[in-house]
Image (tube, rainbow, N blue to C red):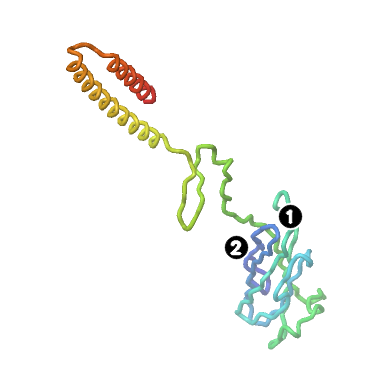
Amino acid sequence: MSGGSGTFLEIQPSELAFPFEIMRQSSCSMQLTNKTDHYVAFKVKTTNPKQYCVRPNIGVVLPGSTCDVTVTMQAQKASPSDMQCKDKFLVQSVVAENGATAQEINAAMFNKEPGKVVDEFKLRVVYVPTTTPNPIPEESELGASAPSYSQENGISHSTMPLSATSVISKLTEEKMSAIQQNQKLRQELELLRKESSKTSGGGFSITFLFVVGLLGIIVGYILKRT
């Protein structure tokens, strides 16, 4: 950000930008550079002195040197609707005697009098919105199909329902098992039929018919499940 130039001091920046966050103090700084061959005294004033703390608010800048001034804005309870601030700062500067110190600076030095140059530079206050990380979305925002996790002993456990792939795999395994049982029952049925044929000379006994009916019921139940 570009600065401003007065008669005695070069001031950077030309406006005070405060990162704005509710219930938190914010600070920014400005640099006062003496561009003369004389000692220059300065004083910083604001239209809202209860809202800001300026350190130092008065001082002396030696020829060719720079003084850093820190401005702290007190915590705000609420943010303005348009994020605009009407507060302003005024930097006054005058030529001081060589060897002057900050302790020797007084308000009378900045009074405007005939033949006396009191340089003034105004700075406006700007609020800069701070960017905060996006909060973690709640479970209701993720939707019913999104997974949720719990942490236990450093291991993440998924509490989401089985995926479609897992369900298909499970059904396939059950179907293969049912087919194998069906084949086994058919083999046992064929064996019983042969034994029954040997016993009854080619006829079917009541016991054989009962076993065949029972096996048919079992096979039908298994196939119905698959």
Give the position of the C terminus as an image quadrant. top left
- Mark sitting on residue 2: 2
In this rendering, is residue 218 above or below 16? above
Which marked residue is nearer to the observer: mark 1 or mark 2? 1
Helix, strand or loop under label 1 = loop
Circle 2: residue type = Ser
Residue 78's disc number: 1
The outermost residue toward the bottom is: 99
- Binning the other alpha carbons within 10 Å of mark 2 as few (below 14), some (14 to 19) or many (20 upward) gives few
Q: Is residue 14 left or right of residue 146?
A: right
Question: Residue at (64%, 82%) from the top-left corner?
Answer: 62
Q: Quadrant of residue 190?
A: top left
Instruction: Give the percent coordinates (x, y) of residue 214.
Output: 34, 20
Asked whether 45 or 117 is in front, the reply is 45
Q: Position of residue 21 (x, y in %)?
A: 67, 58
Residue in view at x 70 percent, y 74 percent: 55
Q: CA distance from mark 1 to mark 2?
A: 30 Å
Q: Quadrant of the N terminus?
A: bottom right
